[in-house]
Every structure is written in C-alpha cells, then in structure tokens.
Amino acid sequence: MSDTGNIEKRIKRYVLGKTRSFFVSTLPGIEQLCFDELTRIGLAMADTKISKGGIAFSGRVHDCYLANLKLRTANRILMRLTTFTASNFRQLEKKLSDLPWELYLHKDADCTLNITSKRSRLIHTNAIAERFKNSLENRLKPLVNAAEKNHDSPVSLSQQIFVRAENDQFTVSLDSSGELLHKRGLKSQGGKAPVRETIAAAILALAGYQPGEPLIDPMCGTGTFSLEAAMITNNIPAGWYRNFAFMDWPGFKPSRWKHIRQDAEKQITPVSEPNIFASDIDPDNCRALNQVLRKNNLSDTINVFSANFFDLRPQNINRDMKGLLPGKHQGLIVLNPPYGRRLEKKDSIDNMFTEICKKLKKDFTGWKAALLVPDKHLLKKIPFKATPHDFFHGGLNITLVTGKIG
C-alpha cells in the first residue's frame, strides 16, 4: 500500500487535478429545469447529457461543491468513480482490487452500499455487496490518511456508494451530497403531506415566479413554498444552511469551499420588507414557521398569519405592508390543497377543490396560480387556462397546473 505522502499526491493528481464525471439526480419530469440551473451557475458544458431522472456533466471536484450548494431542483449529486464489465464474480473481484478507494474515502468511513442489477449475469445484490465490502476493507484497513489526521473538524465518516449493474456493465459512484438535497437545513418539523423543497422549487419555476414579486401561500402548512420563495428572493443558495458528504472526503479542500461560500455570500441580497405572505388555518403551523423565520433571519421576507383561505382576500392582506399594494399589484398564489392522508373521502376532495376554484376565480383574478391537483378528473373544474405538469408526490400521482387566473 502506498505511503501517506504518496496518497496525497495521488489525490491531487487523480481526484482534484482531473476532470471528473458527475450525475445530478432529479425528479423525473424536471430534468430540463435542473439543466437550466446548471447553465446559470456556469456548469452546463458541451458534454452535458440529459436523461430520464437526471443530468450527466463533467467538471472538477470543486464544481461538484458549487452544484451541491446552488442547485434547487437536484435530489443528489454522484461522482462517478469507475465503470467496468464483469460477467462473473472472479472478474468482479479483479476489477474491484484495482479500485483505489483510499483516494476517495477515509479509512474509518461508514459506507452504505446501494446496489441495483438489471439484465446482468450477476444478479444477486447481496453477493455483489459482499465483494464490494471486501474490496473496501482490503484497501482502507491498513491506511492512515494524513488528510484525516489533519482534518480541521470532526468527520461524520458516513458515505454512500451507488453501484448499478446493467448488461454486465458496472457503474460505481460516490454520493457527494449526503442527506438528500431537499433537506435545506432550515426546518426540522414536517407536515402531514409535505411537499419536498426540490419539488417546491420546481413548481415555483414552472409558475414563473420572479424574485421579489408578491407571493401568497394560503395553505402553507410547514411553509415549504414560502421558505423556498424567500431563499430565491434573497438569492440564498439552496444548500446554504447545511453540510455535505464531500466535506468528509480525503481530498476535500476547506479553503476552496470557503472561497465558494464567500462568493455566494456576496450575491445574497436581503429584502427589507415582506413580499411573501404565508397563512394557515392551523395556528400551530404558523407559530412553528415563525420560529424558523426568526432562527434564519427571514422574518423581513415572509409575513405569517393564521387565516382560513376562504376568508382571505388579497386586498385585505396587511394593508400597511408595502410589499403588497391593494388593487395595484398581482403576483403568484400557490396552493397545495388537502388530499390523500389529509382528506380521505373522494367527495370531500371534489367539494373542497370546487370551492377552491370558485374562490380563485372570485378574488384572485389577474394573479398567476400554481395549484396541485390530486386527481386528473378535477382538471375540468379549473376556471382559467392552465398548463398541466405531472408529478409523483407523497405516493400519489398528482398534477400541477399553472396559469393566469382570468
């Protein structure tokens, strides 16, 4: 096994000094939105490829840092380690013996293996996992990394390895994100049917939400839409409040990461008065959301109050707040009505949705709308010209409709 100094040189040469291949995992159906994000942050390169469920791109390791920090619609970002062909376990063991795990993992890393096999002669995932565990142990056990000894902060050493075998070809990837990227680090509480932050970001983009325009979130629950809009309005990166798995890699460069965050911090533009209005019929939800706002210095962006949506009129919301001028400004109203576990009976869902549509037509004419529809048969009730977008959310196939209420 190479000595410590040689390992550091190899990390610089083969991990940090080379262009690497990455895969951004997304919710199916929003790959183009994520690609557009990559383009805006300067990472969509000539060899970028969109496929179902994600985007492949090439870049340096610090580009992976930036993508994790800024992408709002990504689920996780994988760094490709190797691809090879193996049709029997002897071949698999030989290929794995050559994989330099020590360049990517600390010797005490707690590795979780995620293995899938399709149309391959090696179909037993437990047996495949056993070979990978042996490979990891053989390469890492004798190792003492100087990078680990000199690590500035305690490492969690929890890493995920993804292995996909298809037609006897293996693709081995290391997760750079850690927890799924929808976990922004803003809040800990969850609602009965929470929309993931990545889905909320996609919905806001599809609805044409612009930073700073009025937004009403009248069934806010835990406030996912409002918080996501607040981060967009203030230009706060999606991953600003959290850590990532790449921070525990042997080749992680804290100085580079600090520089990336400093550049991002210069672009944050705090607002001085609320333009996002979150309400919920449950006062406990409102209290919990206000706690999140105070903790993360977002109270100047979002105004929270308890109200029944059906009693709400935009011209009566905070008449003294300059962020929403009665009768002069429209913006976006975003709604995730009760359905599924929150409202079990079909008749109740239909009646609720009918009343919501009537309310939108009566009091929100001229506003843009983003409305989650739990069943396609309800689309005929939409009282304005709307564009449908299909999602899989909370174990249900649902449809988002966007449009302007006329």
Image (cartoon, rainbow, N blue to C red):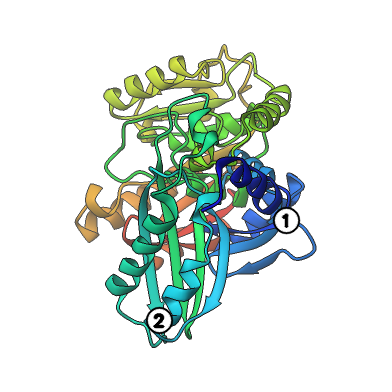
Q: Which residue is mark 2?
A: 90
Name the secondary structure under disc 2.
helix
Q: Mark 2 is on which residue type?
A: Arg
- Neighbor class of circle 2 (other Cα within 10 Å; few <14, some 14-19, many 20+) is few
Q: Nearer the viewer, residue 105 or 262?
A: 105
Drawn side of residue 397 relative to residue 46, left or right: left
Q: Which label sits on residue 200?
A: none
Question: Residue 68 location in percent, x, y?
Answer: 58, 43
Residue 40 appears anywhere in the view: yes
- Above or below residue 203? Residue 263 is above
| Residue at x-position 56% and y-position 72% | 83
Secondary structure of residue under mark 1: loop
The residue that label 1 is drawn on is 19
Q: Is residue 134 left or right of residue 360?
A: left
Q: Quadrant of residue 320?
A: top right
Where residue 151 appears, as percent x and y from the top left, is 51, 28
Label 1, label 2: how many angstroms apart (C-alpha)?
30 Å
User: In this picture, is 278 found above or below 80?
Assistant: above
Asked if one can make out residue 28 in the rendered structure from this viewpoint, the answer is no
Which residue type does callout 1 highlight?
A: Thr
Front position in the image: 1 or 353: 1
Label 1 environment density (alpha carbons within 10 Å; few <14, some 14–19, many ≥20)? few
